[in-house]
Image: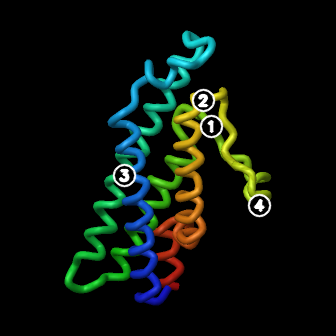
């Protein structure tokens, strides 16, 4: 991939990760389980689900913060190094994007059949409180952009390196 194109992908990724990081940080800093469940029926049943959901969001937040710092470092260097940039973009795919689409506690999943129908592709294991649902749908739109732009980096970084050598 040409160096300038890789640099543009790094800039786009940095901007998307900044937006994701800020949205997650704001939500996680100002919301609590009691706030989320105050208007819900069957609160006792939902507490564990919401707790798992928030754990997954905190994990995602950390992954996105680290990805943001790494891609920022790539762009701050005096000389842009495409090999380093490609490695970082690959790490972002495998940490940030995968953390969103495959949450550890499986509180939701992506149903690919809905991707092209202008419906929400995220299907929740249980019905979440509205603020969690809105946040997840909002994040899914940002991660969809990232995933589409970085699909080249979904291939294992080391596999691409071996292909270059041959």
Q: Distance between the residues labelled 2 and 4?
A: 24 Å
4 vs 3, front mark: 3
Which residue occupies the foreground of this view, 16 or 134?
134
Circle 1 residue: 108
Q: Indicate which disc residue 15 carries.
A: none
Question: Mark 1 against mark 2, which lies toward the viewer?
Answer: 2
Residue 128 — which label?
A: 2
| Label 1, residues with CA under 10 Å away: few <14, some 14-19, many ≥20 | many
Lower sequence index among marks 2 and 3: 3
Residue occupying the point 33% across, 36% down: 29
Q: Which colour scheme is used?
A: rainbow
For discs 1 and 3, the disc positioned in front in the rendered view: 3
Q: Where is residue 138 in the image (x, y as percent from the top left)?
A: 55, 50
As helix, strand or loop, the secondary structure at mark 3 comes to helix
x, y (%) of residue 65?
33, 53
The residue labelled by disc 4 is: 116
Query: Against 160, is 147 above or below?
Result: above
């Amino acid at each position: 991939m040409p160096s300038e194109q890789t640099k543009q992908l790094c800039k786009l990724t940095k901007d998307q990760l900044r937006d994701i990081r800020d949205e997650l940080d704001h939500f996680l800093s100002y919301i609590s389980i009691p706030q989320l469940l105050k208007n819900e029926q069957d609160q006792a049943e939902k507490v564990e689900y919401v707790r798992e959901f928030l754990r997954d969001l905190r994990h995602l937040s950390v992954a996105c913060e680290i990805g943001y710092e790494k891609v920022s470092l790539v762009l701050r260097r005096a000389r842009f190094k495409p090999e380093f940039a490609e490695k970082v973009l690959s790490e972002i795919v495998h940490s940030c994007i995968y953390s969103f689409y495959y949450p550890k506690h499986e509180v939701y999943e992506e149903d690919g059949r809905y991707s092209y129908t202008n419906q929400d592709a995220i299907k929740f294991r249980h019905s979440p409180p509205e603020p969690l649902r809105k946040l997840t749908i909002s994040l899914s739109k940002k991660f969809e952009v990232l995933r589409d732009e970085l699909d080249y980096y979904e291939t294992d970084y080391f596999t691409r390196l071996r292909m270059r050598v041959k």
